[in-house]
Structures are given as C-alpha cells and as structure tokens.
Amino acid sequence: MDIHEYQAKELLKRFGVAVPRGGIAYSPEQAVYRSNELSGDKWVVKAQIHSGARGKAGGVRICSSEEEVAEAAQWMLGRKLVTHQTGPQGKLVGRLYIEEATNIAQEIYLGFVLDRKEERVVVVASAQGGMEIEEISSNEPDSIIRSVVDPAVGMQAFQAREIAFQLGLDAALIPQATKTIIGCYRAMSELDANMVEVNPLVVTTSGEIVALDAKLSFDENALFRRPDISELRDKSQEDQRETYASDRGLSYIGLEGKIGCIVNGAGLAMATLDMIKMAGGEPANFLDVGGGASPERVLMSFKAVLNDKNVEAILVNIFAGINRCDWIAEGVVRAVKELNLKLPLVVRLAGTNVEEGRQLLADSGLNITTADTLTDAASKVVAAWKEASQKEPV
Ligand code: GDP
Ligand code: MN
C-alpha cells in the first residue's frame, strides 16, 4: 500500500528525519492560507498523488507570490496528472502539500528496498540524486552505493556513517546524514514498510540535510497490526477494479487484456493466464476466488471481473478440492441471471461433485460453453472472444 508524500514525511519526522515545514490544502484559498501560515517568500506547491516524477509533469511548482501559489493550486487540483509512472489515465489530484521552499546545494538519492536474493534490506544511495534510480543506474552506475543490513542487529551507526562518507559528504554533515539514514531504516522496519525512498535527500545551502521528497510503501499483509497506517489509505489513488475486489476479500490483480478470469487457487490462476496467452488471447485479470467459494462469492467474483469495462469474454476455471463444483455452478448460474450476462462464457469444472456441477449448468438452459481441460477451456474462450469481437459493429 502506498501513501502520500506528506504522510510519509510526517512518519519519517517521528524517526528523526528532517523535513521542510508544510501544510495540506484542498483548495487554492487554503493553499494561499498555508503559504501565509508558513511565512517566508518562496513556497513549493506539490500535487499529492501516488506517483513519483510529478515534477516533470507539472505537479511540483516553486512559487514566489500568493498569486502564483493560487494559480499553481488552481491548475493542479482536480487534474488527472499523467506522469510516466501513472499510465496514460493519470492520477487525480485531490490534495496539495504546500511547503516552505528549500535552497538546494546538492541532491542525493537514498532508498531502502527488500532484496529477495540477499533476503535483506538493502540501502541504495547515490550522490547523483534528483533523477530516478533507473536513470541513475543507466547514466551514473558507478555512483551507486549498496549496503546490506543485517536484520539481527539492524542499521548500525558505523554502517550509516560509512554510507555518508561514500556519498562524499563534508565531515560536518556526517552526523546529520547518519541520523537520517538510521531514521529511515527504523521507520521501515518498525512500521512494516517494504520500501522507503527519499529522492532527493538534499544538502541545503545553509548546511542541513533535509528529505525533500519521501515515498513509503507498506506490506499489506502486516496492515492488520498497523491500524494507524491503514488509515492513511487513499482509495482514490488505487486501481478501482482492485479496490472493489480487495474490499471484498478477493485476490484480484487488474491486467490489460480482454478475457476475464475466475479461478480457484493462485497457482491455477497463473497457469490459466499463461494458457490464455498461449491460445492467442490476453487476460484482463488475475482472480483467485479462494478455497470454500460459496455461490455468493462466485457472484461477487463475476461483479469484480465485470467492473473492468474492457472485458469481452469470461473464463471460469475451477479445480475443486476443498471447493465443490455444484456450489460454483450454482454461483455461475446466479451470476449470469442476476447480472444479465451477455458476454461469451466458458466454464471448466473438475474435482469434487463435478457431475452435479455440470448438470446444474446444463439444466440452466443458459448459453454457457463447458470445457473439460484447461487447454480446451483456454482455446474455447479465446475462440469465443474472437468471434464475438468480430460481430461487433466497427
Ligand atoms: P517528484 O518529481 O514526484 O519526484 O517530486 P520531488 O518532490 O522529488 O520534486 C521534484 C524536483 O523538484 C526535486 O528533485 C527538486 O529538484 C525540485 N524541488 C522540489 N522541492 C524543491 C524546493 O523546495 N526547492 C528547490 N529549489 N527545488 C525543489
Ligand atoms: Mn522525487
């Protein structure tokens, strides 16, 4: 789960990381009010969306008058900001963060990620901050510093100091840099974050180290024990298809294709996506209905799949071990009737009570194509989708 920059800064501050002063605004008037509150003569108006690279998209503006603040706020609020991380649909700007402007002497990159091969948190840093880590690694690969943290002892002061020295910082800045690095690491481990990125971490012209941008991402499986973090969730920033499904306990991931999938078991769901591709189609989603799927849950899965307006055909693939094929079939029949489903539908059932399940589908009198094997099911759904899409008026 991602959170907004201002929320990330608030959290990092509690761990001793220095951040600029700022305030949140939902309207241009409020933005001006915030800038007055902060005093000074230069402010930064920052669009709060769950994406980086806002600067290049016009979502970060340095302003030197009230008028400029109001104008920047007016431009950003309500806009779907498209950055190269958001995809072409962009993300809606619903709130702004107004900060006192910082005078930058140097921009540093500082990131904390989980390295799966190392099975450790790895600190990635570079004295060439400001650009994204991908750019740094292609433009300035030699500038990248990597440091692996031993989880038994956590980030040690000597280790943080070593990173600070490798960044080439002045001796006078080492204590502050060390405090910042340790603070970020502690925030990550104590809040169950799986990513912390401060880009840029800046050295100011007055010799201070300040986090000018901050990104924190959290492990969703740990949110149950972090109610204060859960509260920071902003659904307006998420894929609406995924929000609907996750609110209902369905394991769903939105994809770009046309064939909606309802499968039980994550492994089978992955295999189903592969088979659809091999048959010449593109899956619209990953969806695991889970073990004991009641007819209600199947109906809910259909709704989740149909929330995606790109879906043009549906494949239900169930291998019932804990599940029962007759329950699934009952759910399928209900879904087709209640949702008045007109799209091509292929159902493959196998396992417990398979005969009863197939009978239910046959007796329904509905236009449902059945399949025996996964290969059969995948080729049938792709064929049905192709046929249906050809019939559509151009
Ligand atoms: P991002 O584009 O979404 O990563 O947003 P950032 O918060 O990182 O801002 C982008 C860039 O704007 C930074 O790398 C800085 O160069 C610049 N910037 C942001 N805040 C300030 C500020 O207070 N003063 C100055 N001079 N530049 C800033
Ligand atoms: Mn940034």
Image (cartoon, helix red, strand yellow):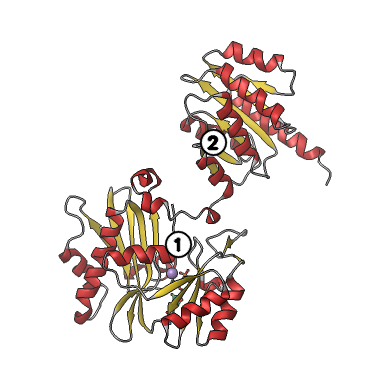
Q: Nearer the viewer, mark 2 or mark 1?
A: 1
Q: Is residue 240 above or below residue 11?
A: above
Compared to 341, does 105 lie above or below? below
Task: Identify the residue under disc 1.
Answer: 4
Tell me: 342 left or right of 326: right
Mark 1 element type:
loop
**Dot 2: within a 10 Å radius of its alpha carbon, few (fewer than 14), some, or many (20 or more) residues?**
many
Q: Residue at x 60, y 38 (%)?
A: 304
| Residue that carries the numbered disc 2 in the rendered image | 287
The residue that appears at 19% across and 74% down in the rendered structure is 175
Q: Position of residue 197 (x, y in %)?
A: 37, 63
Disc 2/disc 1 C-alpha distance (Å): 28 Å
On screen, residue 119 above or below 301: below
Residue 120 lies left or right of residue 263; in this view the side is: left
User: With respect to residue 308, does 332 lie above or below?
Assistant: above
Quadrant for ligand 2? bottom left
* Type of amino acid at the residue the image marks with label 1: His
Q: Which residue is at a point 58% across and 24% down the rendered structure image?
A: 295
Please state the horizontal and vertical placement of residue 292, each as a whole percent of the image. Answer: 48, 24
Determine crowd level at label 1: few under 14, some 14-19, many 20+ residues with C-alpha closer than 10 A.
many
Residue 145 visible: no
